[in-house]
Amino acid sequence: MPDLAPGDIVWVYLDPVVGREQSGRRPAVVVSSRGHLLIADTLVTVAPITSVDRGWSNHIPLGPDALQHPSWAMTEQVRTISRERVVRRAGRVDPGTLAEIRRWIIDFIDE
């Protein structure tokens, strides 16, 4: 799927996985920048989405228009995957939600 954009919600296949990584076919938010999507044109960085509200502050709620049920982006499980794992587009998150997801990712990798 070559025409991905930051904030897209896409269905991806995450198997095979190891340990406690999210598995199976599931939605994810594209968190790659436009520059990353242009340079690494066979890869995309995503945050998997869950429908389970664990009450964790780093699980960012997606707006009611994002998917058909309450959902949260799991910022602790960010993965860079092959675009061959992307099945189809399912929606978009608003710019504010994408910014909040990215803030948590930066917090996890910053010293």
Image (spheres, rainbow, N blue to C red):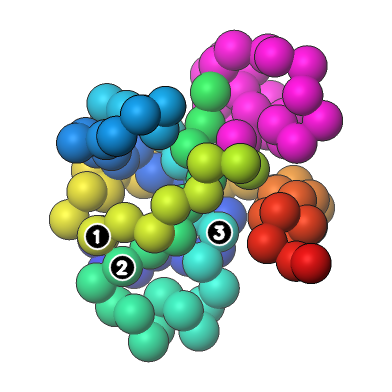
Report the amino acid beneath label 1: Ser
Q: Secondary structure at mark 1?
A: strand
Whether residue 82 is visible here, answered yes or no, is yes
Q: Which residue is labeled 3 in the image?
A: 31
Residue 98 screen position, x and y as percent:
69, 53
- Please state which amino acid type lies under the numbered disc 3: Val
Q: Which residues are magenta?
A: 51-74
Residue 65 seen from this side: no
Where does the image place residue 80, in percent across and percent down from the top left? 39, 59
Q: Residue at x 68, y 62 (%)?
A: 109
The answer to which image quadrant residue 54 occupies is top right
Magenta segment includes 69: yes
Residue contact at pointers 1 and 2, CB within 8 angstroms: yes
| In this rendering, position of residue 78 left or right of residue 27 | right
Q: Which residue, given by chain and number where applicable, does mark 1 sit on? A: 82
Query: Which residue carries the number 2 mark?
Result: 43
